[in-house]
Image (cartoon, rainbow, N blue to C red):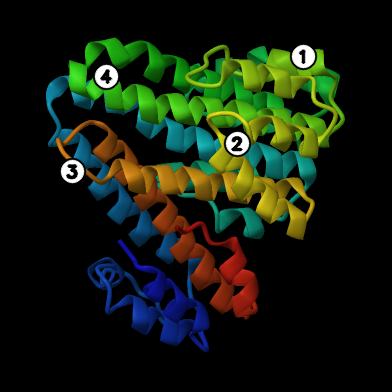
Amino acid sequence: MLSIGDYEKLVQAVDIDEAIRLLNTTPYGEVLSKADLRYPLDPTELDRVLSEGLLKIYNLVINSSPRNVRNYLKPYCKKLYYDNLVLILNAVHFKTPAQTVMRYLIPLTPKEMDEYKNLLNMQTVYQVIDLIRDPETKQILQEVLPDYESLNLPIVFEVALQRSVYKSLWRNIVTLDLTDRRYARKLIGTKIDVTNILIIMRGKSQGLEPLTIESLILPTFYRAEHAIRECIGAQDIESILNILSVSEYRDLAYKVREAYMENRSISTIEHAVEEYLTQQAYTAMIGYPFHIGVPIAFLDLKRNEIRNIKIILFGKVEKVEPRVIRDLLIIF
């Protein structure tokens, strides 16, 4: 894993050439050695080698796990695919330039990258959904098109995909042994709760009615169900944070409030929530005995690391100020 010091050196690099030289001194040197990164930098080539490296890690972690753990982790790979589709659907809906979105996408295969490029060229979310290759994913999104038409907000697609993957992960916890069940419940349950909290805050920021927000949240709770349900009827973001500050998620409330006081935007809240989940992943990596939370957390952290590297390198190509790049990174 890259350290905070590694990130700071990369952020402070004067240009893309220095950033790549610095990255070559880290474990990513072997990955980058397989790419042609001469000026001008080809984003496709960068995506290719980083994706191949991540896929290699995913396969190594999953295939080296016991069979029941391996079967449990399979839907987790689909979650990464879903996360990418959510970014694309949001980009097409809000007319975000494809080049901006590409730096956040993490395809696992060249085939996925080709699909993402084609989807980003579409003009409407209807066209995006029609072109999605996976029939199960396409059906999930098609089923919530009436909700999209009613609200005119792409959050319905994100919620539908999250509901599908977390339903599978939560239901299949029973297939694990007792130790793994305990850790899986904690890690996946926290993700579900935090997802619901974020859905509620997004809904409030977009002026949705409580009944609409309630229809969007995931139908599973791990901790603080009463507080989370109370948040649905809260008047605003501040009220939500006040409720959470006296719940099991007081540490999340503190982190979000600290960020929100500096910049009152939903993107600031989303970034703080991602940092909180990253902190939880680091915590899951510590301790004994070895349990299923370790590979799950490791996969999350590696995904974020690839995302951070892409943001830094693309930022250097586009001559973005270091402070702006730094603010985009999700680190702990």
Work out whether mark 1 precedes mark 4 in sequence or the reverse, and give the earlier one: 1
Rendered location of residue 311, percent (x, y) = 53, 64
User: Residue tagged by mark 4?
Assistant: 181
The amino acid beneath tag 3 is: Leu
Determine if residue 129 is in view.
no
Mark 1 neighbour density, 10 Å: few (under 14) some (14–19) many (20 or more): few
Residue at the spot 61% in from the left edge and 26% down from the top edge: 196
Asked whether disc 1 touches disc 2, contact meaning CB atoms under 8 Å apart, the reply is: no
The amino acid beneath tag 4 is: Arg
The nearer-to-camera label among 2 and 4 is 4
The nearer-to-camera label among 1 and 3 is 3
The amino acid beneath tag 2 is: Val
User: Residue tagged by mark 3?
Assistant: 60
User: Residue tagged by mark 1?
Assistant: 146
Work out whether mark 2 precedes mark 3 in sequence or the reverse, and give the earlier one: 3
Rendered location of residue 174, percent (x, y) = 28, 10
The nearer-to-camera label among 1 and 4 is 4
Q: Which mark is residue 217?
A: none
Mark 3 neighbour density, 10 Å: few (under 14) some (14–19) many (20 or more): few
Q: Secondary structure at mark 4?
A: helix
In space, the residues marked 4 and 3 are separated at their CA atoms by 22 Å
Q: Secondary structure at mark 2?
A: helix
In space, the residues marked 2 and 4 are separated at their CA atoms by 29 Å
Mark 2 neighbour density, 10 Å: few (under 14) some (14–19) many (20 or more): many
The amino acid beneath tag 1 is: Pro
Q: Secondary structure at mark 1?
A: helix
Q: Can you say whether 71 is above or below 325 in the image?
A: above
Residue at the spot 54% in from the left edge and 26% down from the top edge: 193
